[in-house]
Structures are given as structure tokens and as C-alpha cells.
Amino acid sequence: MRHTLTHLFIIALGVLMIYPVVWMVVSSFKPNTMIFSDPGLIPKAVTFENYITGWKGYAGTTFGRFFINSLFMCLVSITGNLISCTMAAYAFARLKFAGKSFWFAVMMITLMLPGHVTLVPRYILFNSFEWVGTYLPILVPKFLATDAFFVFLLVQFIRSLPKELDEAAIIDGCGKWGVFWRIIVPLASPALVTTALFTFLWTWDDFFNHLLYLTKPETFSVSRALRTFVGDAGAVSNWGGAMAMATLSMIPTFILFFALQQYFVEGISTTGIKG
Amino acid sequence: MHKTSAIIKFLKNNVSAYLFLAPWLLGFLVLTLYPMGYSLWLGFTDYDFTKPGSTQWIGLGNYMKMFGAVFGMNEFTASTGEVMRIDPYYLKSLSVTFSYVFTSVPLKLLFALAVAMLLNQKLRGVPFYRAVYYIPTLLGGSVAIAVLWRKLFEKEGLVNGLLGALGFTDLPGWITNPKYALWTLVLLTVWQFGSSMIIFLAGLKQIPQEYYESASVDGANKIQQFFAITIPLLSPVILFNLVMQMIGAFQVFTQAYIIGGGRGGVLNSTLFYTLHLYIQGWTYHEMGYASAMAWVLLLIIGALTALVFRSSGLWVSYGTGE
């Protein structure tokens, strides 16, 4: 009896928590005039009108383009983070070199550093390279392991791997690259999946960098394009379209979340990432 | 002979290690260390990147611009002889951000802890519930949710629709009313309690069940157990969550930008620090000023983090539970 009540309470609270999201999805199928204050979850009339008007996008560029742009940025970012962060993590976790503890401390400090102190100079730097308006200011830093969280996550993981395997590989004639490729990378794959997953989410949901660096509509990401529904005074002209495209923008996140749930939980509980 | 081979081995080890470290090291030097030094310098200048060559050293001018209003000034004469106006909105952005951080972070942590304790029972389906409760966090930082939030808290929005159905009348437009606008953003933040919840849940699982059993044998009730066992043993996790959430809360941008329509909202009621910084730097091209603002933010976050860590000696116990 007590358990049933607890279950009911947890379910009721859960429904309350996801109600806004569900309402948004349902509203995206309601005719524009009916979205207003209809709190119901069963639409009185179903229409795909919002998806058609929303898909048209902004300045002659459709949401198809925005999705491709976002996906492209995510894939390149994942590649960059996997390569650069794993390399740094391997050095910190396994190799001996002069200045190691110093650099490790530096890396840990950058973990906590608010990004705003580097914002203006980075912009000036990228502007002088004539990179503003391209994807380079967003993608190049990923190849330079600027997301210290992943370095930290991977260091923790690699340290937990048995050292005997490295030693056995060295006896078998592997060099440092051999150990890295044949032993560390395969064994660290759970942490690599977590890295890829969170890189995807952060790039997909990023808005600030896209606002700063993506200036041409044909280069916009999904999140940058969604902003165009909200006018400068904060007014929204096409609520139906905004709801429909916002709903679409969440689908990749949802799929990844339900497919790879255990990596989420591990990623969060080992490093506390994603605020 | 042995000595030289040892030196060669040392060099070889270092070279290969630094090759692995090279991408990170380059990123740190070029994209973190150099920009930090540069922005520190820019903070003492009047700089507009669209007008190169016009950069002027103005000493503490940018800092006067921020805090001059504290001393009742409206304008001051910079070291260049130019009369500069005090930023009339800086202190507002500071107070908005502080109000936001000091309400949203404790509320979020309390809520996350309450839900974590609710889920830390021998129940079936906990992984599923945990996933459902994490959904707001999964989506909450996105532009999509910020757009939705505008819709929910408008005068004609869903929240007023629901409250109206319950018989409430004369409901305000929550987003457009300066009295309430910030609280809609606090609510949006508290709603994203998922990460803190998962970390609390992992911490709660570490507390040995025997402690509670022996406490209840000794006659301690649930509330006494909570304060005598749960809180002390969970305190390192609370400290961790508090620091991470606080650092994050000071840097909130996306939601404020979308909900305020690219500005600080009505009467600047949601003029967050980072939003103000962005407007100064990129709308008005006051990049020297924006850099100085960023350094003040860094100092504020650093000082508060240090304060929390200093105070942790008083309330965090690293004793018993491993």
C-alpha cells in the first residue's frame, strides 16, 4: 500500500515535470489560433500546417539546411574532441614527462574557468583570421582539447584500466602509439561514448557561439535558426511554426538519450557535467 | 655510456609524451592563456575592433564605468581627457545576476535532494523514473525550451490558462511584468534539477543502510536521521553540487537572451551579467569594457568559490563514510 502511494506520487510529480514538453509537442499539431491558452493534451483538430510553415525557415533557407549544418558541426566536433581529448588524457594518465603535475593542475584550473575571460580576445583573434561567419571558430577549438571536462573524464577512466595490459603490450614490442591505439582506445570505449554523447548535446544545444560566429543564414544551426522565430522585442510571429521546429530540434537528443542512457548517468556522476 | 642512454631515454619519453599532449597544450596557450592576458590588457583600454588603431589606454576607466554609480557619479574624466559616462545598467545587471544565483541554486539543490531521496528507495522502475526526471535537464538549456518558456508565461500563455481554469483572475503577463520576469527564469533553472539529482542519488547510495537501522533502533525518527546521518555523509556531494551549480548559474545566457528578446527584458528585469557583457561587446563594440566586465565576473566567481570552500570546514565532513 505504501509502495503504491509512493509510486503514484513519483508518477504524478514526473507528469508535472514533463507536462510542458508534452504540451509543446501536442501544440505543434494544433492550428495556430488554438495554441493560445488551451492547456489540453488532446488536440481538438490535428494539422501539419505548423510543420510546413516552420520548415520554410528564415531568409530563404529551410530547416533542412539548418539540420544538416547542426549535424555537420556535431560530427566534426565529436571527431575533434575524441582525438584531442583522448591523446591528452593518455599522456596525463599513463606517460611520465617533465612538468606533468604542473600541466595537470593547469588543466584542472581551466575546468573551472568561466569562458567569458577569453571571449573577446578569441573573437578578435578569429576575426583577424577572417574566420567569423564560418564554422572554424566553433570547430577548430575542438581539435585542441578546449573542453577540459572530457580530458578529465578520460583521465579518470584510463587511470582505472589495469596497467599490466600496457606492460604486456610493451613487452610484445608496442611503442607508445601502439599501446594507445591497441590497448587504451579500445578499453576506454565507454568513456569515449560518453565524450561523443555530451559533445553532440553541447554542440547541438549551443547557442552563444553560434550567435557570435554564424552570421549568414545559410550557415545557421538549428538553435540559431530557432532564435529567428523570436523577434528582437521578444514577440513571436509564428508560434505554431516555432513549436513545430522546436519539437523537431529535440528529436535527436531524445533518441540519443534513450538509446545511451547508462552513459549519461556515468558521465554525470563521475564528473558532474552538464549543469 | 649508461648516462647518455639514460638521457636519450628521458628525451624520447618526453618528446613522445609532449606529442600526445600537443593539441591540448596548443589549445591552452593560444585559446586560453594568451586570450586571458590579452583581455586583462584590453580591460584597461577603450577598444573597438571595427576601428583598429583607435585603441586608447584609459587605465581604470572601464572599472570606473562599472562602479562609479556606487560613489554617486554620473560621469568622469578618463586619463585621456575624454569625459566618460558611467554605465547606468551595470549595477542592475549585477543585482539581477546575484538575485538569480542566490535563489535558483539553493532551490534547485533542495529540490534535487528531495527528489533523489524519493527515488532512493527499494522500488521497481527507479531507472525509468530517473530518466523521466532527467528530461527537463536534457532539454532545458536549449533555445527550443526557452521559446516554449516564453509561450508558457505570456499573458495569454498556458500557465495563465491553467490558473484561469482554477478560478484566478487578473493574472499578469509573467514574462512582461518586471516584478515576475526573473522568477520565471529561476523556475526554468530549478526545473533542470536532473544532474544534481543524479549526483545526489549516487551519493545517497554510498551511505551504508546499517547506519539508519542502528539509528532507528536507538529511537531516532526520520527527521533526526536525516540531519544526523544523511546530511553529514552527503555533505561532500552537496559541496560539489553547490560549487558547480553556482559557477554555472553566474554564466547563464541563452534563456535570458531568448526570453528577453535579445535584451534585458522589461525595465532590464532580466539583464543578466553575461547578457549585458554581450550587448556591450557586440552591440556597442565596447570590447575593452566587455573584457573588464569579464574579469570582474571571474573575480566574483573565484571569490565566492573560495568562500564556499573556506566555509566547507564548518559543514562538510570527510570522516566516517569512505
Image (cartoon, grey):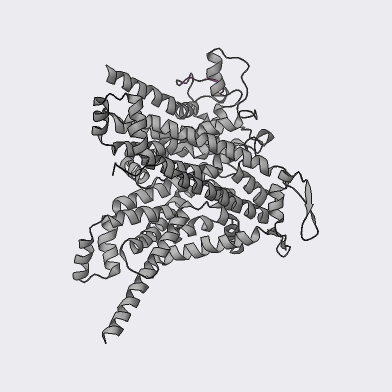
Q: Is residue A41 magenta?
A: yes
Looking at the picture, how far across and down is residue A134, in whole percent?
A: 55, 56
For the question of whether residue A63 can be seen, the reply is yes
Frontmost residue, A189 versus A45: A189
Which of the 4 quarters of the picture holds residue B174? top right
Looking at the picture, how far across and down is residue A127, in whole percent?
A: 61, 60
Q: Is residue B173 above or below residue B65?
A: above
Quarter of the image with the C terminus of chain A is top left
B244 relative to A123 in the view: left or right: left
B148 relative to A179 in the view: left or right: right
Residue reaching furthest to the top: B167
Q: Is residue B260 magenta?
A: no
Considering the whole magenta stretch, tell me its main secondary structure: loop
Looking at the picture, how far across and down is residue A205, in whole percent?
A: 48, 44
Residue reaching furthest to the bottom: B1
Which of the 4 quarters of the picture holds residue B260? top right
Q: Residue at x 58, y 49 (%)?
A: B297
Q: Is residue A60 above or below residue A154?
A: above
Q: Residue at x 52, y 29 (%)?
A: A49
Q: Residue at x 71, y 51 (%)?
A: B64
State which region is magenta.
Answer: A35-45
For the question of whether residue B262 can be seen, the reply is no
Looking at the picture, how far across and down is residue B202, in whole percent?
A: 32, 39
Q: Is residue A41 above or below residue B78?
A: above
Q: Residue at x 65, y 28 (%)?
A: B177
